[in-house]
Amino acid sequence: MTVLAGVCEHGRIDALSPVALAEVVCVLDEDPDLAADVAHECLSTVRAAARARCHRVEVGAWAADDEAAVPGSDGLGLLVLSGMCVRRVGHGDRHAGELLGGGDLLRPWEEPGMLDSMPFATAWRVIEPLRLAVLDDAFLQRVAPHRRVVAALMARALQRSRACVVNLAIANESTAEQRVWMQLWHLADRWGRMTPAGVALAAPITHALLSDLVAIRRPSVTAAIGELERRRMVSRPLGRFVLHGAPPAERARLLRAGASA
């Protein structure tokens, strides 16, 4: 049940807390995988400690790097509970993109500063309404004694970096069709579900997003998708991609490359 209140020092819901009224969630209930290695007899104690404020962001441009607008910059960061957003980084007319969703750990205020030799502009856009657990300093102090939860959160950061390595490897494939085809399967590992027609992607993947992910111009992405559709490797019956047949043989190699990063 959602409770409107603050979170006190020991993780209990405290209606008189000086913390501004906010939706409070149990992070382990929202993301049970974080408790996978927690001993059953300790679970109730850990659940009480792992409570956090929930911050919501609606669809559209998101000033995610504005510490005044985004809470929690004094702790671990923001854990995506649900929804999706795109982080786009670029210089001039060249951009790369990253699709983020449930389970990702974000620290958007840590973007490169003006001291970088080659500053890149970063933009965030929410494509499905976000619910974010604010893992601030108070949250970190409460869960710090529970090392398995902290380790699981650290693993999320590593998983995100490994996914970026796989994206980079895909962007080095020789043809546009191969890049798009492999990227769609990479996305399906996370957002795909089996249907009688094939593997359906739940994520709203656009040509523009694929262009950023695979590092080719949008017209080339459109042409590649058209060729994949002609060869009946993909279809889009309801505006979402459905993948047909087996995943590309190179997928295993790329996943090994990401795992070793």
Image (cartoon, rainbow, N blue to C red):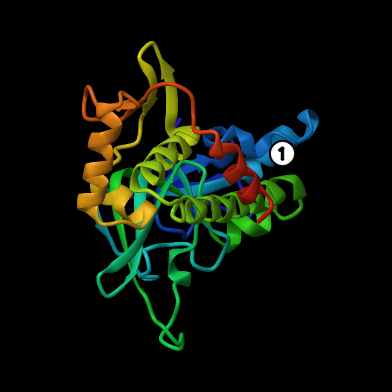
The residue lying toward the viewer, choosing from 181 and 30, is 181
Q: Nearer the viewer, residue 197 or 220?
A: 220
Q: Is residue 152 left or right of residue 8?
A: right
Residue 246 visible in image = yes
Q: Position of residue 154 (x, y in %)?
A: 65, 54
Does the image show residue 206?
Answer: no
Name of the residue lying farthest toward the top: 196
**Is label 1 in a helix, a strand or a loop?**
helix
Q: Residues within 10 Å of mark 1 (few under 14, many from 20)?
A: few
Position of 199 compared to 221: left or right? Answer: right
Q: Residue at x 55, y 55 (%)?
A: 165
Q: What residue appears at the point 63 percent right and 58 percent down from the top-left corner? A: 140
Image coordinates for residue 134, horizontal then vertical, percent: 49, 54
Q: Quick check: 62 above or below 225?
A: below
- Residue at 26%, 29% (x, y): give it: 229
| Three-letter amino acid code at the position of disc 1 | Thr
State the image coordinates of residue 187 (x, y, percent, origin top left): 44, 39
Where residue 120 sits, quadrant-wise, is: bottom left
- Residue at screen point 72% across, 55% down: 144
Q: Is the C terminus in the top left, top right, bottom left or bottom right quadrant?
A: bottom right
Q: Which residue matches tag 1?
A: 45
Residue 27 relative to residue 18: left or right: right
Residue 48 vertical position relative to residue 232 in the rendered view, above or below: below
> Residue 206's x, y, as percent?
25, 43
Left or right position of 244 against 204: right
